[in-house]
Amino acid sequence: MTVAEGAASALRVPVELEGRSYDILIGRRLLDDPAAWQGLPRASSVVVVTNDTVAPLYADAVEDALRRALERPVSRIVLPDGEDHKDWPTLQSIFDGLLGSGCDRRTLLVALGGGVVGDMAGFAAACFMRGVPFVQVPTTLLAQVDSSVGGKTAINHPLGKNMIGAFHQPVRVLADLDVLRTLPRREVAAGLAEVIKYGPIADAAFLDWIEAHVDDLVALDPAALAHAVRRSCEIKADVVAQDEREGGLRAILNFGHTFGHAIEAGLGFGEWLHGEAVGCGMVMAADLSVRLGRLDPAELPRLERLVARAGLPVRGPRLGAARYLELMRHDKKAEAGEIRFVVLDGLGRAQVQPAPDALLVSEVIDAHC
């Protein structure tokens, strides 16, 4: 049985990569549907990597579906929840679990959780036995529309977010919309930041649609969610297919992230959710775009209103411009110590702006913090 035959109601978004193509399946009741797990690489065993928040909700159903679909033993590794655990000791605990269970290079890993679990399980999959296959099963909106797609895996370092990692593509992404109903409101808002991002950088019409349906998205309307997740994944899949390892075009997906990562690192990872920092960072990046003469000034309050309607902060913490600039120079997108920003070249278009004048950036920070 193929995936299409079994999970017929799922929306399918292909990620086209030479030799490493895979599907994103988007739908309802996917986790416990054995058909959604058909066609995966033949495995000697399966290990579900999850956290102590998600495991009680979904791990049993996923493991049961995997046993029925793959007819292989399935075990579980449970990590502590939270961005502050996205580090070496927690990564080491995954390796301890894999080696302690006698796993080999034909083991299949399943990342069941939000962006932290997906990044850490993916990084473990990239390193264990020099690379084993893994499946992304994102359980947050942010992970469904962004971090589960594209093969970026990493852990944090005290000096910067996602500074240590590898590119390792999943073999499938299962985005079950039903799991979003258990998310706290704050997590929903954080995910909407990454949905909103795709409009300004790549699709002005999608931005119009988000403005018209943001209340439906906040309320987790199934039809609105299905469209938002699908269109977000389509845009990201297209960008990743053109630039898998972020040599150029893929950098536009970091709109708002240079400011946002500085907020996360400056406050301490986990104080603000990633999407909250990105939401505020997008407003700051749009202001920078205006000051550089790239964006119509009228679009800045428009984006700020939308970010606020999604339930996201539009004012950053008062770290001081000097501290922001220091943190940005440690961002992984910086080159030779020069900060790089994604700026809007009109709505629906974005490009990387290297090293704008520090005084200009400071003015943006002071205006929004």
Image: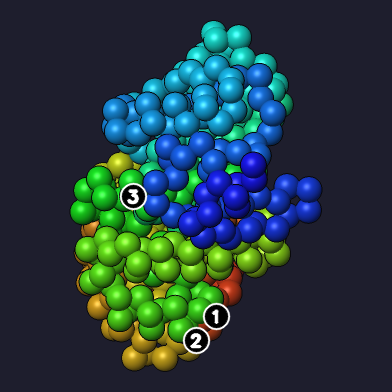
| Residue 337 picture quarter | bottom right
**On screen, residue 290 above or below 221:** below
Confirm whether residue 323 shows in the render: no
Residue position for label 1: 349
Under circle 1, the secondary element is: loop
Q: Which mark is residue 326?
A: none
Can residue 34 be seen from the camera position used here? yes
Circle 3: element type: helix
How many angstroms separate mark 1 from mark 3 (CA)? 32 Å
Q: What element does badge 2 sit on? A: loop
Q: Position of residue 234 (x, y in %)?
A: 56, 66
Question: What's the residue at 26%, 70% (across, down)?
Answer: 216
What type is the residue that disc 1 sits on?
A: Arg
Horizontal side of 163 relative to 54 (left or right) equals right
Check disc 2: other Cα within 10 Å, few if <14, some if 14-19, many if 20+. some
Between the residue at mark 3 and the residue at mark 2, the CA separation in whole angstroms equals: 35 Å
Nearer the camera: disc 3 or disc 2: 3
Q: Position of residue 193 (x, y in %)?
A: 36, 63
Say which of marks 1 and 3 sits in front: 3
Q: Is residue 290 left or right of residue 105?
A: left
- Asked if the residue at tag 1 contacts the one at tag 2, i.e. Cβ–Cβ closer than 8 Å, the answer is yes
Q: Position of residue 362 (x, y in %)?
A: 37, 69
Seen in the picture, residue 240 relative to 357 is either above or below; the reply is above
Residue marked by disc 3: 178
Q: Nearer the viewer, residue 264 or 274?
A: 274
- Assign the N terminus to one quadrant of the image: top right
> Between residues 300 and 98, which one lies in front from this camera angle?
98
- Residue at x 64%, y 45% (from the top left corner): 2
Residue at 44%, 45% in the rendered image: 30
Q: Nearer the viewer, residue 177 or 369?
A: 177
Question: Which mark sits nearer the N-terminus, 1 or 3?
Answer: 3
Q: From mark 2 to mark 1, how far is it between C-alphas?
A: 6 Å
